[in-house]
Amino acid sequence: MCARIFPSQTEQDEFLRNLKLSACPHCKRVGTLNRHGVLRGYDEEHLKHWAVRARRVFCSNRNQAAGCGRTFSVWTADKVQRLFLSAEQLGAFLKAAAAAGNKRQAFGKLQSSMSGSAPYRIWKRFQNAQTSIRAALSTICPPPKLDGAQPGDSPTASTLSHLDKAFDGHELNPIAAFQATLQTFFI
Ligand SMILES: [Zn+2]
């Protein structure tokens, strides 16, 4: 799915207000973009609701418009696609799980209303995404020097330190910063 990811709601709103001035990410035409509904899903703050998670934009090819007919979605960086945790909660969970080695316990700290297999599914997604996460981080900075690392440090712990190093001092939490900077979801 093609996505534009904005650092904040304000910037997302600004983009949506000025859609006609923006180029379509697919065909690069300007003036053909229209709002096209929302993407809904569950998230931690709205578990009882089917909350709005992202907006959809359509590059119009109707009524002789010159667009390509494709869509893309518009997100804020604090959300992760297909995940009910915020970027910040995801970061806290991964850090705790990597440090303690106990995913269920790490997940319990979030006081999430989700339970069961959720921590394992999320951890698995992170594992599967690691190669692309590292490749993306390497475009920003090299991995942290090994001098602070213990011989037993796991690849997941190294990926998380690389993430912290890449976005040290950023105004957003590291996963949100990753998503807004690299325009791709962390997992
Ligand atoms: Zn287009």
Image (cartoon, rainbow, N blue to C red):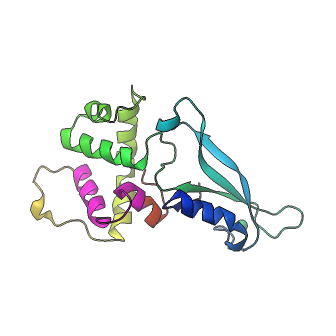
Majority secondary structure of the magenta segment? helix
Residue 174, quarter of picture: bottom left
Q: Residue at x 35, y 71 (%)?
A: 140
Residue 58, quarter of picture: bottom right
- The spot of residue 44 in percent (x, y) is 47, 36
Residue 91 is left or right of residue 143, and the answer is: right
Residue 4, quarter of picture: bottom right
Say if 104 sits above or below 97 in the image: above
**Ligand 1 sits in quadrant:** bottom right
Residue extending farthest to the front is 10
Residue extending farthest to the top is 116
Task: Report the span colored magenta.
Answer: 155-178
Q: Residue at x 16, y 51 (%)?
A: 153
- The spot of residue 171 in percent (x, y) is 37, 63
Residue 35 is left or right of residue 183, and the answer is: right
- The spot of residue 7 in percent (x, y) is 48, 61
Residue 1 is left or right of residue 84, and the answer is: right
Q: Residue at x 26, y 64 (%)?
A: 165
- The spot of residue 37 in percent (x, y) is 71, 49
Q: Residue at x 11, y 60 (%)?
A: 148
